[in-house]
Amino acid sequence: MRLLQRTTRSVGLTEAGERFIARLRPAMKGVSDALESLGELRNRPAGVLRLTLPRVAYVQVLAPRLAAFLTAHPDIHVDASIDDALADVVKGGFDAGIRLGEMIDREMIAVRVGPDLRMVVVGSAAYLEEHGKPRHPRELHRHACINYRQQTSGVTYRWEFEEAGRALSVAVDGRLILNDSELLVDAALAGLGLAYVFESSVREALATRRLISVLDPFCTPFPGFFLYYASRAQLSLKLRALVEFYKVGPGRPAAGR
């Protein structure tokens, strides 16, 4: 029975091949788990750590210390799936994920792995010179705002602010909608409008005045990134090693927000 179909450029599975692989996958995972258990019998973290995280979390949290982590744990391999959508760690077969605390399901165990973050509204000097600076979030309707469409829900994100201790969200308008946070920064640099982005992702641009922040009094810090996983019972040696290496603040895992 043909399991593969070939063209001059690629090789893919036939329907029979897909069904065959689906039946094999649990057995292959069992073999992989058995091999990992040998490492754990030596009391050494080993195996493949499958992680899901957005691009910004990879750049700001995982990547800066990844080389040191791999050096400290030579038997661990990291398989990082970069995805801004909210992936289900259980259904996706991931060991853990990294997300903002407010996005983590309450049933998950969450460990803080980053400092507080802040969102800022930024625009190029040329754009602000032509259109002026908004003094209050309600004035954003007069500006070209670069919207962000959430990959999981498909909903256009409402910009969130705080005024006198009370939350304030604004549905902004503009001619450009993107679903990649890095492209929001590029669009703002190109003078296409105002963008609502992580302050940590535009520090250099702010320092060199390529971008200018506005509405700072309404942009307050909030808890940053957390590493999360399904349950304490599934905390393997390899995952425990990751948690211990990346956690910040109190060491005891806390329930997700």
Image (spheres, rainbow, N blue to C red):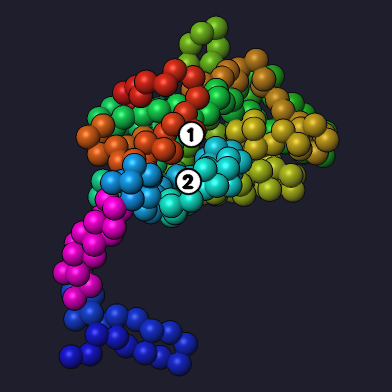
Answer whether residue 186 is visible to the viewer in this image. Answer: yes
Placement of 91 over or under 225, stated as above or below = below
Check if mark 1's residue and mark 2's residue have beta carbons within 8 Å: yes
Specify start and end residues of the magenta stretch as a single range: 20-38
Q: Residues within 10 Å of mark 1 (few under 14, many from 20)?
A: some
Amino acid on which the number 1 mark rests in the picture:
Phe
Secondary structure mainly formed by the magenta segment: helix
Residue 33: within the magenta? yes
Q: Earlier in the sequence, mark 1 or mark 2?
A: 2
Q: Is residue 48 left or right of residue 72?
A: left
Q: Label 1, on which residue?
A: 245
Question: Residue at position x 31%, y 29% from top?
Answer: 109
Where residue 217 sits, quadrant-wise, is: top right
Amino acid on which the number 2 mark rests in the picture:
His
In front: label 1 or label 2: 2
Q: Where does the image place residue 42, in percent across and percent down from the top left? A: 33, 46
